[in-house]
Amino acid sequence: MNTTPDEQASDKKADLAGPGIGDYKELERILPADYYPLLSPKETQQAIFQVKRYIADNLCKELSLMMVEVPLIVDAESGVNDMLDRDGSRTPIQFHISNDRNQHPLDAQVVQAATKWKRIALKQFECRAGEGICTDMRAVRKDYFLDHDHSAYVDQWDWERTLTAEQRNLEFLKSIVRKIWKVLVGAEKFAQELFPHLRNPRYPNLPEEITFLHAEEILEMHPDLPRKRRETVILQKYPAIFIIGIGWPLKDGYPHEMRAADYDDWITDTRRETGRDTHGLNGDILVWNPVTKRRHELSSMGIRVNAETLRKQLETSGLLDNLRFPYHQGIINNTLPLSIGGGIGQSRTLMLLLRKAHLGEVSVTVWPKILKEMCAKKNIVVLE
């Protein structure tokens, strides 16, 4: 069906609203009708912990990271919590701690991600260039629509690594992505060695190599499609991609997706490296999920802002007031190290590698009654 330019613009704007399908009638249509799990619930639990250990150990090995503790709650005044997007649409859970009969109170927030905290931790743990940290991060994101691959409960391998000013370029970014991809491909093989029945002709394995595409390239290929449809179409050709340059407005006036202004660098001009009008030192790992037959995001990551790009991105986003926070001051005053980092969704990855149709098969959290009943009809066992 042909759409008018106004309708195309409306679709693209709506697509920036973030994750989630947003309609349970649509979700019922999307969930596979011919699904049967390859692992029993008991086998699934055994696989989860073996594969999680494999991925954590090998991320640390490939990226020179060490495992560290990570906060579940942070001081609301610290500015450390992750706001996810720069439009204020997803806010953290906040609560008051009266402490000592309210004489020494605190206002705290449940983390939405440990993105900013990790950069502070690099300094705290005295990580030198080339060293970093990895965390078994837990978070709550209350503003998600709960569907097959979004939940209010978030678990990630949240990692961060120091770098030098000379490494703030696309080639270094790609080198890190390739190391992460090597771990994920290895984890799939490891899971199938543990449980050979995960090898199934219906579900092809991940490709050995990941394809790099800039968001501008994908837009040029499919200029009339909104972002998620562009990703869906491109994954038919390349089943594993890293999309570079997320956050900067593309040639159609819209960013590929919104990004917060104070961690990933999405404003740096990269035309010298790409030979075209491009920006951004960040990106997402996406794959084609053969079970759900949908796009499947595994990781968001990037080279982080320096003093110059932080100020530019905050100014562009109308958020210069955030410079009052200690985290932002640490970047502006160059007391926090330059870094690269990201989050790899644990349940998302396990859902993919263990050939599951729903996040609720590999993680225990809350789901609405309508979703649980829908899953039960489709042979999807949601854990409770």
Image: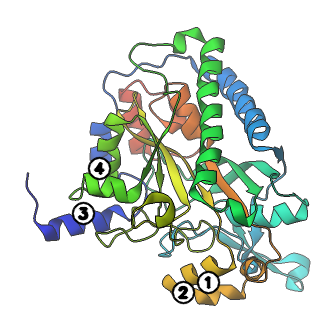
On-image quarter of the C terminus: top right
Badge 1 marks a residue whose secondary structure is: helix
Q: Is residue 363 visible?
A: no
Kindly identify the amino acid type of the residue bearing the numbered disc 2: Glu
Residue found 70% across the figure and 72% down from its top: 95
The mark nearer the N terminus, 4 or 2, is: 4
Residue 53 in the image: x percent, y percent? 75, 31
Instruction: Quickly name the residue at label 2.
Output: 315
Instruction: Quickly name the residue at label 3.
Output: 11
Residue contact between numbered discs 2 and 1, judged by CB atoms under 8 Å:
yes
Task: Give the CA distance from mark 2 to mark 1.
Answer: 6 Å
Q: How is the image coloured?
A: rainbow
Q: Nearer the viewer, mark 3 or mark 1?
A: 1
Q: Residues within 10 Å of mark 1 (few under 14, many from 20)?
A: many
Instruction: Quickly name the residue at label 1.
Output: 311
Instruction: Quickly name the residue at label 4.
Output: 229
